[in-house]
Amino acid sequence: MADKADKKAFALRINADMLKALEEWAAEDFRSTNGQIEFLLAQALAKRKRGKSRDAG
């Protein structure tokens, strides 16, 4: 992952129930809520990238 100097802050509007579920999941995984969101986004982007390379071949 990028270091803190490479990160950009932005506002995220999210459903309260979804946020609560993310906070609980993050706590189970010993991550901050922000860290959990970054982790999930990184997984989704990696999966998308793998899917595109599979479609191209």
Image: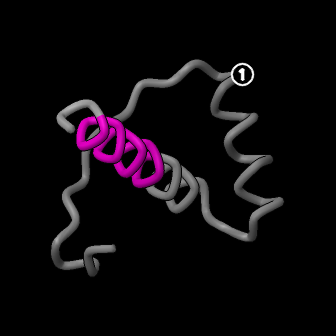
Residue 57 vs 28, above or below: the answer is: above
- How crowded pointer 1 is (Cα within 10 Å; few <14, some 14-19, many 20+) is rated as few
Q: Which residue is drawn at 65% across and 67% down?
A: 31
The x, y position of residue 30, in whole percent, is 74, 70
Q: Is mark 1 on a helix, strand or loop?
A: helix
The x, y position of residue 7, in whole percent, is 22, 65
Q: Residue at x 25, y 36 (%)?
A: 52
- Tell me the quarter of the image containing the N terminus: bottom left
* Magenta stretch, residue numbers: 41-54
The answer to if 52 sits in the magenta stretch is: yes
- Tell me the quarter of the image containing the C terminus: top left
Question: Which residue is at the front of the view, 6 or 9?
Answer: 6
The x, y position of residue 18, in whole percent, is 66, 26
The x, y position of residue 5, in whole percent, is 18, 78
Q: Name the residue under label 1.
A: 17
Q: Which residue is drawn at 83% across and 60% down?
A: 28
